[in-house]
Image (cartoon, rainbow, N blue to C red):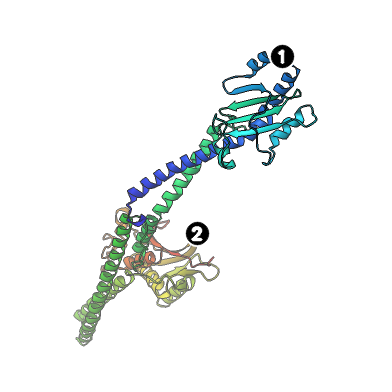
Amino acid sequence: MMARVGIVGRLILILLAALVLVQLVTTAIYLWRRDQAFDARLSSPLADQATAMVALVEKASPEELPVLLRAFNGPDLLVTVADGHGAIRDERQPRRPIEALIRESLPPLDPPRLVSIQYQPSRDGSAPRRRILGRFMANRVVVTVGLADGRYLKAVADGELMTRLFGLQPGFFAGIIGFTVALLAVVLFTRESRPLRRLAGAVQAFGRDPEPRPVKEAGASEVRVLIRAFNDMQMRLADLMRNRAFVLGAMAHDLRTYLTRLRLRAEMLPDDSDREGWVRNLDHMHQLVEDSLTFARVSFGADRGARSDVARILTHEVEERAALGAAVTAGTMPAGPLAVVGSEAAIARALGNLVDNALKYGGSAELSLTVEGPFAVLAVEDRGPGIPLDMRAAIGTPFQQADAARTRNGGGAGLGLAIAREIAAGLGGGLEVGDRPGGGARVVLRLPLAPGAA
């Protein structure tokens, strides 16, 4: 039933249920308070009043008695003195503590004086059929006490017997009830919004990892429709990205074949400047094909279940580049291994692209590795002209390069940093571009630490 109710209807039902609950709880507290009021009030004020009236009546002369009764009686209290006790509490019922209190406060008689306390629901004096229900429905208390001369004093107290509960105003408890109900409403609203929070988390996760992860359909009908549409969109996008990767892979495979044939023919040309130009252009085309294929592959998703030692990857990169004569050095490094999320091949490719850019545009690369919170921070700095502020937003975008100051050497398709950014984002990290102190560019690769890594 609730699954077919819209989110607006659910919120309205929650509010109505909260209001009904307030009324029910308030009514229950009122009845309980009034029930307690009989014993709480009678155990002190009314008991004292009853014993005082009995003492005065027993000492009064026949002429003074009518004056005393006039003084006792009021809108909520009726006191009479009669020869018979009339209706009293059933002796088979347990004796109430207030009865013993009144008897102990009066001079003893032989036989013991009669003390009876009755709760009555109406002025006709009829006893309630059920004791518990009768106490809830009672609106007056009848006190009957035997006098020393054989007569009986009967006091009937009507109306509210206690204006405070535990010494506090009833409004205090109304505020507590209102706060409790409001807290309950917040809990219910939070429960209703939980499917939306799960959906929002799934949307963010899909932006980082396009692998489809269906969200459980729950909540109001509109929310279920939204979740179903999102799950369908995930599947369609995943299929599109798989198809894109397949098409690019097929194209790259065929292009690599033709490029290999062309390069073989270029190698057979006479040794002159034209031959070198042909070989250089073919190498650039081959690199473009490889970069395009890599970008399509990494943009589909990264392996977050793998763990790699990024310190070892960095050390290996520096050693390999230095062995080839490149100006690559290592700066700040951790004392031991540093495990991060991601495969070694993906992280090495991202780091290699950053180093290639630094060498290409700055002539050198200075690498460092530190830890900041839950991330390993891998920084690559160069001493080139730097990257202008207005161009940094485009860095990392596919087929986008910086201005001529950074691309004076030509070549490249602008996919190096895009690949590095996609790898980092797929693992839950990111790529940042800034300035190196003293001049040059500083590119930072943030990779999430593996669980348990220091």
Q: Earlier in the sequence, mark 1 or mark 2?
A: 1
Q: Could you say which quadrant of the image residue 407 lies in?
A: bottom left
Tell me if residue 105 comes above or below residue 323 in the rendering: above
Q: Could you say which quadrant of the image residue 387 lies in?
A: bottom left
CA gap, disc 1 and disc 2: 94 Å
Quadrant of the drawing holding the C terminus: bottom right
Residue at numbered disc 1: 62
| Rendered location of residue 415, percent (x, y) | 29, 68
Residue 279 visible (yes or no):
no
Amino acid type at image mark 2: Gly
Q: Does dot 2 land on a helix, a strand or a loop?
A: loop
114 with respect to 254 (left or right): right
Residue drawn 33% across the image and 48% down it: 8
Residue at numbered disc 2: 373
| Rendered location of residue 204, percent (x, y) | 36, 59
291 with respect to 185 (left or right): left
Amino acid type at image mark 1: Pro
279 with respect to 124 (left or right): left
